[in-house]
Image (spheres, rainbow, N blue to C red):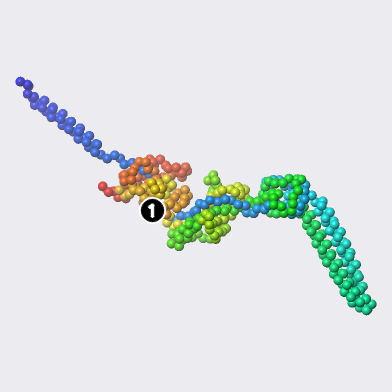
Amino acid sequence: MPARPNGITSLALLFGAAVLLSGCNDQSVASSQPPEPPEVSIVTVKSAPQAIFRELPGRIAPLRVADVRPRVSGIIVERLFEQGSEVKAGDPLYQIDPKPFEVELQAAEAALAKAEAAMQQAAQHASRIETLTKSHTASQASNEVAIATLAQAKAEVAARTADVSRARLNLGYATIRAPISGIIGAALLSEGVLVVQNEANALATIQQLNSVYADFTQSVNDLNRLRRDFERGDLDRVSEDAVKVRLVLDDNTPFPLAGKLLFSDTKVDAGTGQVTLRGEFKNPSRELLPGMFVRVMIEQGRDPDAIVVPPQAIQRNSSGASEVFLVKDDNRVVAQPVRTGGLVDGQWLITEGLKPGQRVVVEGFQKFAVGDAVKASNWRVSEQTGQPLDKSAAASVPAPSQVR
């Protein structure tokens, strides 16, 4: 017969079974605990007064531009300027052979002297005839002829005087001078070339660059939307003396000097639906050159309750519309459609979809799906680098209320 287990053996078996059951219960409890929610960085939406800027494409144009053209015909004998240099109005640029014009002036002066001599003779003859007529020695008809001859002689002197003025003017035009002050470009003709009065081809071009224009366009829809915002009171108007425009160059470098808005065109381009605007900028260093493409920042109003978010907070849904992710009071994430305005100091202006106090996700989008619970912490930016600070430096943001 098998040996019956004694009391000690039974007690050991019972203890082992209890240990096994306890281990199973511990594993079951551990496996039932939920995982730690993912950590995301958020910003809390605030409203504040904000200037509303529009960034528009533009192109630089010279303040004044003039083509250098000959006003008389002749052979160019000398170029008197350095290409690319600065010239003043009236500076000599080209010299046309002056000899033909000098001879022409001498001939005109000789003809004038002859006409003046004839006029003097006619005046003396008319004076004598007048005296004889008074003494009834000469007829009245002779007196009338003498008076007419004197008048013709005076007219001839006037004509010859005009010829002298024309010849002297043409001699002056033989020296081609700068019509305006500015920077002169390349010499398009050289010495020995025959030029014709008022010919189509210019000899050079002068552009005034100490101040320049920036011509830019804005869609009429944007202007109408801006007008409606003013009428509803969503935007405060900028005072007239504060209408300034700024430039951003191709390499994203801001131009240091602010300009002034000159005008807004009163008609819409039928082909593009755009309205043309123009600003004027001082250009002392000649940094802005004609034809250069720039971006124009124009302040068109002030939003007293503007809401802005970092650019990375804006996401695109499957239809291409803008949206953000909000952390609700229960720390769960929901998608919120928004409408964006423009960039304001590197942040997106939100015109519709957000309210002050809402918490918007800025980082950690890959860690959650809509409806998941998350752990939110403040998103902070270094003032020196503009990069987010290490998350360990960000304090945890408690939810306003917890729903269990």
* Mark 1 burial class by Cα count in 10 Å: few <14, some 14-19, many 20+: few
Q: Residue furthest right?
A: 137
Q: Residue furthest front?
A: 141
Q: Residue at x 91, y 70 (%)?
A: 125
Q: Residue at x 60, y 47 (%)?
A: 287
287 left or right, relative to 305: right
Name the kind of residue labelled 1 in the image.
Gly
Observer-nearest of 330 and 366: 366
Q: Residue at x 57, y 58 (%)?
A: 262
Q: Secondary structure at mark 1?
A: loop
Q: Residue furthest left?
A: 1
243 left or right, relative to 185: left
Q: Can you identify the residue that label 1 sits on?
A: 353
Observer-nearest of 274 and 250: 274
User: Is residue 32 in view?
Assistant: yes
Q: Residue at x 78, y 55 (%)?
A: 170
Q: Is residue 20 above or below residue 255?
A: above
Q: Is residue 204 above or below residue 112?
A: above
Quarter of the rendering occupied by the N terminus: top left
Quadrant of residue 31 within the rendered picture: top left
User: Is residue 178 in view?
Assistant: no
Counting from the top left corner in percent of width and height, residue 158 is at 82, 65
